[in-house]
Amino acid sequence: MSGNEVFNPSPEFSSRAHVGSMEAYRDLCRRAEEHPEIFWAEQAEKEIHWFEKWSHAFEWHPPFVKWFAGAKTNAAYNCLDRHLETRGDKAALIFEGEPGDQRTITYRQLHEEVSRFANALKARGYKPGDRSIIYMPMIPEAVVAMLACARIGVTHSVVFGGFSAEALKARIQDLDAHLVLTADAGWRRGKELRLKDAVDEALKECPAVRDVIVYKRTGAAIHMQEGRDSWWHELEAQASADCPAEQLDAEHPLFVLYTSGTTGKPKGILHTTGGYITYTTCTMKWVFDLKEDDIYWCTADIGWVTGHSYIVYGPLSAGATCLIYEGAPDTPAWDRWWDIIERHKATILYTSPTAIRALIKQGEAWPGKHDLSSLRLLGSVGEPINPAAWEWYHRVIGKGRCPIVDTWWQTETGGILIAPMPGAVPLKPGSGTLPMPGVLAEVVDFEGKPVADDAEGFLIIKRPWPAMIRNIWGDPDRFQQQYFSRIPGIYFTGDAARRDKDGYFWVLGRVDDVMNVSGHRLSTMEVESALVRHPAVAEAAVVAKPHEITGQAVCCFVTLKLGDWDHHKLGLELRQWVAHEIGSFARPEEIRFSESLPKTRSGKIMRRLLREIVTTHTVTGDVTTLEDLGVVTKLAAQHDED
Ligand code: PRX
C-alpha cells in the first residue's frame, strides 16, 4: 500500500447506508452549519424520547454551554423503556465471560434488572444529585450499574478496573461519592482481578462512603464490612421491578469520567444528559451505520469513555445488540476474538490500533482459523492508526470488503467528532477523514489563524456540539484555562493535526505533556508524582517513547536520594511502584537513573530534550537555556553504553 491510496465506499454498502453519498453527507453538514438550532432540534426529536421539550436548542456563553435546557429526559429510559414495545425480545447484550460462560440479555430483561437495582439504590436513600463510583469487571452488571444510576439521577463515575486502590481513592475523594458499586473480582488471563480488596484499601481514607454493593462474580473470598457492605443479589432479591425513570433536566449530570491532564491530578470530565444521549445516538447511526440486525462489538472497557458512549449509551439508545467480553484477547489463545466473532456472528468490530498491532504480531494463522465473513464494518479509536496496521486490519480481518472507520474523539468530546460516514466518505488510511455534521474543526497556529493545507497546527473546534464537556468536576477555572484560554472562547483539543487539500484531517498526537499508551491517556506529571512519592527518589522526569505495539511507552528519568542503591533492583521496584500507585497499564517500560536532570535556568525540567534522547538517542534541539549541558550529553551517551 503506497500510503496515499483512497478507498471508495462500495456501491452495495452505500445503497444500504444511512448516509449513502457525499451529497447526502454534505447536505447534513450544510444544514448543521447554517442552522445548528434547527438541525440539532430535529435530530433530538427524531432520535430521543423527551418527557418535556426545550424552548431553544442551545445557549453558548463560552466556556459554558447548555443543550436543550429545560427539557426533561432520562438516558436509561432512552436505552431501555422506549424499546420495550418494538425490541423487547431483542438481545441488548450478549455477554461472554473469560472462562467461557455466556448470557444473552434481552431489552426486556435488562430493563427489569436495571429497574430492580435502581429500586435497591433508592431504598438505601440515593436520589438525583448523589454520586456513585462504579469499579467493576466487564460484565453485564457494570452496564446495569450505570443505567440504574442514570435511571434515578445518580451521577456515576466509572473507574477502570485496572486502576489501583490509590487511584480509586483519589477519584472517590474528588467526587465525594457516598456509594461504591463493585464486584468481588473479575477474570483476567485466568487470574482473579481482586476488585473488592482494592475498594477496601481505598476506603481506609474515604470516610464519606456509606454503602458498598458487591456483585458476586468469581466467588473469591473477600471481607464484607458489617453496616457498610452488602451483596448485590440480596438487595436485588428484595427490590421490585417497577421503577419509573426519573424525569431529569437535559443538563442533569449523567457522569463524571476522570482522565489525565497536564498536572499530577486527574480531572473529572462532566457530561450531562440530553445533549450527550442525542449526540451518541446520532453518531452511532452515522459512523457505525447501525442496522436493526447488527451484532455490534466494541472491545473497549466501560472504564473508558469509549465504553460509556459506544458500549452503553450510544448503542443501547439506538437499539443495538452489543457483544461484551470480559477478558483478555489471548485467553485461552490468541484467536479468542476471532472465535467470538465467528460464534456470535459479529457484524461490526470497534477496537484500537494497539490491539490490532498486538494481534498482527501473533500472525495471520489465528484469524485464518475462523470464519469472519459476518463482519461488514471495522472501527478504530484511541490513537492514530499506522498504515501497516490499517492494511492488515482491512485485508486480514475485513477481507478487503469492510470499510474502516477511524474515529477521532476524546473523553471531553463525549462522542466521535471526526470520522467517515462509511457509505459516503472515501477512506484514506491513517486519516479520520471529515468532521461530523455541526463539528466545525480547524487547524490553526499559535494565534488561532488557520494554517495552509497540509501544514501542521493545533486542532480546534469552533462551535459547541451536544456531547461536549460541560465542566471539570469542582474546578471551573481549570476547565476554562485548559480548553478555552489558548484561543479565547474556542475549544482547544490539545492535539496537533494537519488538514489536506481535500479537507481530510490527520491527527498527529498530543501537543501537551499527555502520553497515549495503548490508547490510554496518561499524564507525565501523574507518573512523576507517583515516582517522587517513593522514598528513594529525589526527582523524576517522564516522557513517552515510541513503542511498536502500544504506540507510546512510559520512560522515566530518575535521580535518587543519597544512598547505596542497586539500580537493577530499584528499577524493577519503581516500575512496580508506579503500577501500584496508578494501575498496571501505567507500568513504565524503562527507568533510567541519572545524577541530575536537564533544566532551564528557571528550574523547569526540559522534557523536550529527554523526549529527543529516547526517540533519537541524540540531542540536536536548542540547548542554550540549559543549566548543565553535561547532564544531557551524559544521558544521551548512556544509551550507547546500555
Ligand atoms: O490524541 C488523541 C487520541 O486520544 C486522545 C483522547 O484520549 P481519550 O480522552 O483517552 O479518549 C480516547 C478514546 C476516544 C486524543 O486527544 N486519539 C483518539 N482517537 C484518535 C486519536 N488520535 C488519532 N486518531 C484517532 N482516531
Image (spheres, rainbow, N blue to C red):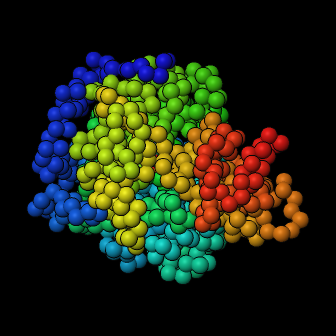
Q: Residue at x 43, y 47 (%)?
A: 495
Whether residue 259 appears in this view of the structure is yes
**616 lies above or below 50:** above
Picture coordinates of residue 23 (x, y %)? 18, 27
**575 lies above or below 265:** above
Toward the viewer: 217 or 201? 201
Q: Residue at x 38, y 20 (%)?
A: 6
**11 lies above or below 576:** above
Picture coordinates of residue 500 (x, y %)? 35, 30
Picture coordinates of residue 423 (x, y %)? 28, 27
Left or right: 481 as drawn, with respect to 640 = left
Left or right: 76 as drawn, with respect to 262 = left
Whether residue 297 appears in this view of the structure is no
Left or right: 40 as drawn, with respect to 429 = left
Q: Residue at x 37, y 46 (%)?
A: 445
Quadrant in the picture for the C terminus: top right
Q: In the picture, residue 297 is in which quadrant?
A: top left
Toward the viewer: 101 or 366? 366
Left or right: 550 as drawn, with respect to 481 = right
Picture coordinates of residue 484 (x, y %)? 34, 60
**12 lies above or below 323:** above
Residue closest to the far front: 624
Q: Please tell me how many numbered marks the rendered image carries.
A: 0
Toward the viewer: 368 or 166? 166
Q: Residue at x 77, y 56 (%)?
A: 594
